[in-house]
Image (cartoon, rainbow, N blue to C red):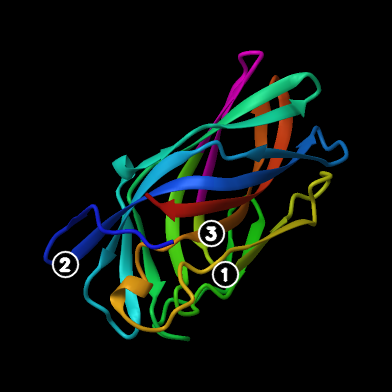
Amino acid sequence: MVGEPSAESGDWWEFEYEVVDGEIELVVSLLGASLDTRYGDFEGGDITIQFSKTEDDGVREVRIAQDDWDIVPILVEDVQAGIDMDLGLILTDDCEGWLYVEEDAGDADFDSVTTPAGSEVDFSGGTDAGGMVIDVPLQGLAETTVGADVTLDMPVTMTTGSCSNTASYAGQAVDGSKLQATGVTFCKGSGGVADYVGTNGVLVTTGAALKLKLVGMAVDFQFAIEMELEPK
């Protein structure tokens, strides 16, 4: 599916996307108890992505303004026995990234990212033609059905390639837990501007938010997000 720009300037094309599918896999450990995995489906949302008209070393710049990210909260059922959670994913700042228009082009390479909490993320791919790598300063707002809420700071890198997260928290069940996710490039063609912008694709990310408090108890979250975007 190929879309058309909703707006453009001398330097940028602007495309409107909608979230048509996807899910979050959420691994939960309460008070160091055994791991419990829950799933929540994306119910929709809108994202406006800007692509630079200029190309530098086979790479176009990509931007998402903070106000151009509007994702419907994700329902995660039984995140704790008898307690459901609505997880809102919001941006705390603008996003910047790259869209690759040639194989193995550019110099934006990711090996791994280690957070202060001890969670390591490894990346591979995302730099194929039609691939995207974009930094997304996310914050998760988790609202539970019993009124106990928690904020998850989760600045992540989203990619059309593959990524895995290994959560390291000594003495807790989440220690050594690994999640993986694999995306889909925004195009598989190899010629012309229209082949590279305005096409559908799948962005993924993994990460962890450790040592939090929820309903008066310590909790570790580990997550894998898969989000399918389609032009309007």
Disc 3 to disc 1: CB gap under 8 Å:
no
Amino acid under disc 3: Val
Check disc 2 and report its element: helix, strand or loop.
loop
**Residue 182 x %, y %:** 64, 64
Residue ranking furthest to the left: 10
Disc 3 to disc 2: CB gap under 8 Å:
no
Which dot marks residue 17? none
Q: CA distance from mark 2 to mark 1?
A: 27 Å
**Residue 219 x %, y %:** 72, 34
Q: Which residues are magenta?
A: 140-155
- Horizontal side of residue 179 vs 72, given as left or right: right
Q: CA distance from mark 3 to mark 2?
A: 25 Å
Q: Is residue 213 above or below residue 1?
A: above
Residue indicated by mark 2: 11
Instruction: Please name which of the two marks, 3 or 1, marks the residue nearer to the observer.
Output: 3
Q: Residue at x 57, y 47 (%)?
A: 21
Q: Is residue 67 above or below residue 202?
A: above
Quadrant where the N terminus sits is bottom left
- Horizontal side of residue 200 vs 164, given as left or right: left
Q: Main secondary structure of the magenta part?
A: strand
Q: Residues within 10 Å of mark 1 (few under 14, many from 20)?
A: many
Which dot marks residue 161? 1
Residue indicated by mark 3: 202
| Number of numbered markers | 3
**Residue 206 x %, y %:** 62, 55
Amino acid under disc 2: Asp
